[in-house]
Amino acid sequence: IKVEELVNESFDRISSVDGEVKSFLTLNEEQAHLQAKALDEKPWDESRGLLAGMPIGVKDNIVTKGLRTTCASKILENFDPIYNATVVNKLAQAEAITIGKLNMDEFAMGSSNENSAFGGTRNPWNTDYVPGGSSGGSAASVAAGEVLFSLGSDTGGSIRQPASFCGVVGLKPTYGRVSRFGLVAFASSLDQIGPITRNVEDNALLLEAISGLDASDSTSANVEVPSFIKALTGDVKGLRIAVPKEYLGEGVGEAARASVMAALKLLESLGATWEEVTLPHSKYALATYYLLASSEASANLARFDGIRYGHRSDNAENLVDLYKQSRSEGFGDEVKRRIMLGTYALSSGYYDAYYKKAQQARTLIKEDFEKVFENYDVIIGPTTPTPAFKVGEKSSDPLTMYANDILTIPVNLAGVPAISVPCGFHEGLPLGLQIIGKHFDESTIYRVAHAYE
Ligand code: GLN
C-alpha cells in the first residue's frame, strides 16, 4: 500500500464524518500530501522511521511550525507558531504524517470538549454524547477512523477519560517521560503529552517514538527509553494487582464496577492475583488538583496579554485597558474561572491556607501510591465513574463536571503513568479500564493491557 493512499483515506474519512464529529480544527492537507509523496519515492528499507507513513492527529495545544495552533481559544485563533514542539520533531523523525490539529477544551480545561471556543467534538459512538475531554478531538478522531494515531495531553485525566468515553487506548506517561517543550502549558507540574491509539501495540510504538530526555525541557527525565513493544509478551503469571477500595466505592456506577470485576477475573485466569488496598488520601485529590492546577494556570496564562501573540482588542484606550479587554474578549468562561481561582489561591494572606496546604496534600497522595507499589506491580480500577454523558448534561455545573475526574486526577498528582483500555460497553457506550504503574514502568502497564486486550 502506498502512503499516498493511506493519507487520502484519512482525508476522505474526515470529509465524510467530521462535519458531525468535529475532531479537527485545522487540516494539514498540502503538507501531508507532499510528505506522502516523498515517502513513496524512498526505498522501503531499514532506514525508514518507526511510524513511516502513518497518519496522525495532534492536539491543538502542541505547537506546530507554520500550522495554526489555537488551544481551542479565541485568544489564539490566528496563531501560527514559529517552531515545533519536541514531540512534533520526533514524529517527523519517525516519518509519521501530521494530518491536522485536533479539537479540545480551551487550554485543556474541561472534561467534555464543550469548552472549545470553536464548537465541541461529539462522541463517534453516539453524537448526542460528549467524547470526554480535554483531548476529546484526539480520542474521537481515532475512534472515528479519521487517523490511526493521535497525541493528547493529560493534566488531570485528559487523555484517559476521553479514551475511555470513545473506546480507544490512551496513556498518560510518567511525568518527565515525554518532553513538554512546545506543549502550551496549563499546569506545568502535572501536564504530560501521551499517545491515543486503537490498540495497545500501536500505543507502545507511539510512546517509544515521542519519549526521551530533551535539553529544552528541564523537567524531562534522563531515563532510558526501552522498547515498549518488547513488553507485550502476553504473560501476566504471578503479577500482583492492587484494587483500591476508593475506586469501586461511592459514586462509581454499577456498570464501571462490573466491568472492572470482569477484567480482574480474566487477568486471574491468566495467572495474576489481586487484592483490595486503600489510597486513603484520594478523597482530597479533587480539591488538591483544582487548587494546584488553577494556581499554575493563572501564572502560565499571564503571557496571553494581547501584545505578544493572539487576539488584541480594538476597543482599548490605554495599555492596562488593552490587557484587560484582550483577555476578557479572548478567554472563555472556564478559563477565566480557573485564572480567578488560581490568582486567589496564590494571593498573599491565602497562600498558606490554600496553595501550601494543597502541596502538602499532594505529598500524602503520592505517598499512598508509593506504599501500595511496595507490594504490588500495578493498580487497577475504572477510568471514570460512568460512561460518556450527554452533551449539555453537566455544562452548567462546574463542580459536577470536575467530579468526573475523580479517578484519574490522583495519578497526575503522584506523577505515575496510567493507561485506559476499552473494557466493554454500557447501553451502547464504551467503558474504560485504568491500569496504573510505578514511575517509569510503562512496560508493565503495556504488558498487562496487552494481555487483557
Ligand atoms: N478535566 C480536568 C480539568 O478540567 C483535566 C484536564 C486535563 O487533564 N487537561 O482540569
Image: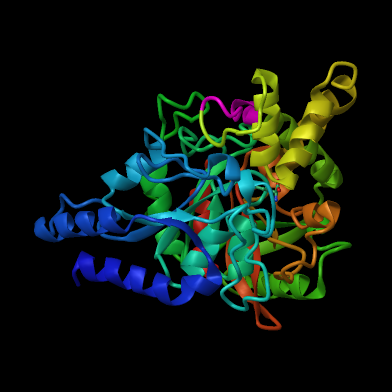
Farthest bottom residue in view: 427
Number of marks: 0
The answer to whether residue 365 is visible is: no
Q: Is residue 376 above or below residue 423?
A: above
Q: In this view, does 131 lie to the left or right of 216?
A: right
Inspect the magenta stretch and tell me whether residue 298 lies in it. no
Q: Is residue 446 left or right of residue 326?
A: left
Q: In which quarter of the image is the N terminus?
A: bottom left
Residue shown at 62%/66% (left/top)? 131
Residue 278 relative to residue 300: left or right: right
Q: What stretch is highlighted in magenta?
A: 300-308
x, y percent for residue 381: 71, 61
Q: Name the residue located 41 percent from the left edge and 36 percent from the top edge.
A: 81
Vertical placement of residue 453 versus 193, above or below: below
Q: Quadrant of residue 400?
A: bottom right
Is residue 310 visible in the rendered image? The answer is yes
Q: Residue at x 81, y 74 (%)?
A: 254
Q: Where is residue 120 in the image (x, y as percent from the top left)?
A: 62, 61
- In the picture as drawn, the residue positioned furthest to the top comes out as 348
- Which picture quadrant has residue 427? bottom right
Q: Is the residue 75 above or below the residue 1 in the image? A: above
Residue 328 at x, y = what percent?
Answer: 71, 37
**Residue 402 image offset from top left, x and y in percent:** 79, 52
Depth check, front residue: 69 or 440: 69
* Side of 259 where 209 appears, left or right: left
